[in-house]
Image (cartoon, grey):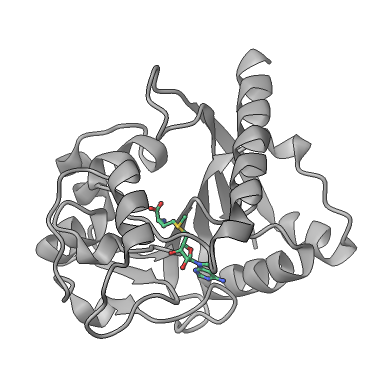
Amino acid sequence: MITNWLATSSFFITRLQLQALRPFFYKVLSTHRPFSYYRRVFYHNQNAAAVLDSLKGKKLVDVGCGYTPYFSDSMFTACALKGIDFYGIDPIIQHNVVIDHTDAMFSLFSSGQGSFHTKPASSEKALHATADNLPFADGEMDAILSCWLMFIWIDDEQELLKIFTEFYRVLKKGGTVTLYPMPDWSCISITSSSLQSLLRRFSVQQTFVFVPFNAIYPPANQITLTKID
Ligand SMILES: C[S@@+](CC[C@H](N)C(=O)[O-])C[C@H]1O[C@@H](n2cnc3c(N)ncnc32)[C@H](O)[C@@H]1O
């Protein structure tokens, strides 16, 4: 299908470009996105009220959330204001976070118009942690979102195995992991048999995300993995 071909080529070109830039940075770049971005890539561009309504009573975590908790226009802030259990985890989360020049530049390229606050709206839900060691109990989460991290910055299979083992552990049965940007799922080649068998414990759905003439949305797939058993 043409959309899968487009998603796959755009994903691998974007990943190559980022990997070429990587030696110039001392870490994975941290950015932030407005809620409108997350609505578009994770929730089929439904309006904010519909998305927030659908999340009432659920527990979610944004893995590799970057600076999103610190911005007034983020999904993290929108959920905090509505009392929705939405966590953000990232190794950059800390008390009195400061955005350096590189991060400020990339945040500018990737973001909306929100204002930066050194203390997130619901600071107890912005947690310093990594994807392979999540601070949650077994079966606690309804959904995991991860934007611009899995398979694009983190593509080492052993690391992915640890991370998806952790995702599997914290999700309820029927819980979901949603990732963007992604290629066609069948074009991800995995050699580790442990990772292959772990991923078989999820069902896979993909949706093509396309926003013409807007480089912050590469034409790519949003992939939802649902924990089967
Ligand atoms: C490109 S940013 C994406 C931020 C945000 N999701 C967005 O779309 O703007 C990738 C983020 O992943 C974080 N990160 C890198 N390695 C990680 C890991 N092992 N576990 C969790 N987060 C990680 C980085 O600190 C960085 O903030």
Q: Is residue 98 left or right of residue 173?
A: left
Q: Give coordinates of residue 63: x percent, y percent.
A: 45, 65
Say which quadrant the C terminus sits in. Answer: bottom right
- Is residue 87 or residue 139 the one in the foreground? 87
Q: Is residue 192 left or right of residue 228?
A: right
Question: Within the image, what quadrant is residue 94 found in?
Answer: bottom left
Q: Is residue 121 left or right of residue 229?
A: left
Q: Give coordinates of residue 124: x percent, y percent.
A: 24, 82
Residue shown at 21% from the left, 50% from the top: 52
Residue 129 in view, yes or no: yes
Q: Give coordinates of residue 117: x percent, y percent.
A: 14, 68
For residue 3, above or below residue 58: above
Q: Give coordinates of residue 64: x percent, y percent.
A: 45, 64
- Is residue 182 or residue 100 the one in the foreground? 100
Residue 153 in view, yes or no: no
- Residue farthest along the top direction in this orientation: 2
Count of numbered badges drawn on the protein: 0
Residue shown at 24% from the left, 61% from the top: 76
For residue 10, above or below residue 150: above
Q: Is residue 19 left or right of residue 117?
A: right
Residue shown at 68% from the left, 36% from the top: 12
Say which quadrant the N terminus sits in. Answer: top right
